[in-house]
Amino acid sequence: MENATGLPTLQGELVVDMSRVAFCDSGGLSALIRAHLRAREAGAQLHLLRPTEPVAALLRRTGAARVLSSGELRPRTPIGKPVPSPADGATRRYWGRS
């Protein structure tokens, strides 16, 4: 199934592990914003998992923290293993290092 933009329709979250990112410049921030917009167009949500303080500070300074979901998520799972969310029934996939 595809939406009006031609992207596959998704449900759930795309989780990006930011715990080892020591530096993010405007190019990296732009890529995160574009990924957020593409995920939203496809019916999903981008979530930044455990951003480091320099990245979190950049998100706050630029206002991107108001748009991008970030922080800690519940259970740590093996990479790529789908985990159903009991709250909303959506599926999350974790792609960062454990």
Image (tube, rainbow, N blue to C red):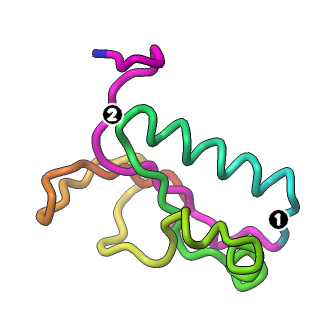
Q: In which quarter of the image is residue 75?
A: bottom left
| Circle 2: element type | loop
Image position, residue 38 (x, y; %): 54, 36
Query: Compared with residue 64, is residue 46 higher up or lower down, i.e. above or below?
Result: above
> Of the residues shown, which amino acid type is indicated by label 2?
Leu
Q: Quadrant of residue 58?
A: bottom right
Cα–Cα gap, marks 2 and 1 = 27 Å
Question: Left or right: where does residue 33 sit relative to residue 69?
Answer: right
The number of discs equals: 2
Q: Residue at the location (45% across, 34% down)?
A: 41
> Of the residues shown, which amino acid type is indicated by label 1?
Cys
Q: Give the range drawn in magenta.
A: 2-22
Q: Residue at the location (87% across, 62% down)?
A: 25
Foreground pick, 3 / 50 = 3
| Circle 1: element type | loop
Predominant SS along the magenta part: loop
- On the image, numbered disc 2 is attached to which residue? 10
Image quarter (top left, top right, bottom left or bottom right) of the N terminus = top left
Q: Residue at the location (79% across, 54% down)?
A: 28
Q: Residue at the location (76% across, 57% down)?
A: 29
Counting residues from the start of the chain, the first of labels 2 and 1 encountered is 2
Q: How crowded is mark 2: few (under 14 residues within 10 Å), some or many (20 or more)?
A: some
Query: Residue 84 in magenta?
Result: no
Q: Residue 76 carries which label?
A: none
Q: How crowded is mark 1: few (under 14 residues within 10 Å), some or many (20 or more)?
A: some
Image position, residue 32 (x, y; %): 67, 52
- On the image, numbered disc 1 is attached to which residue? 24
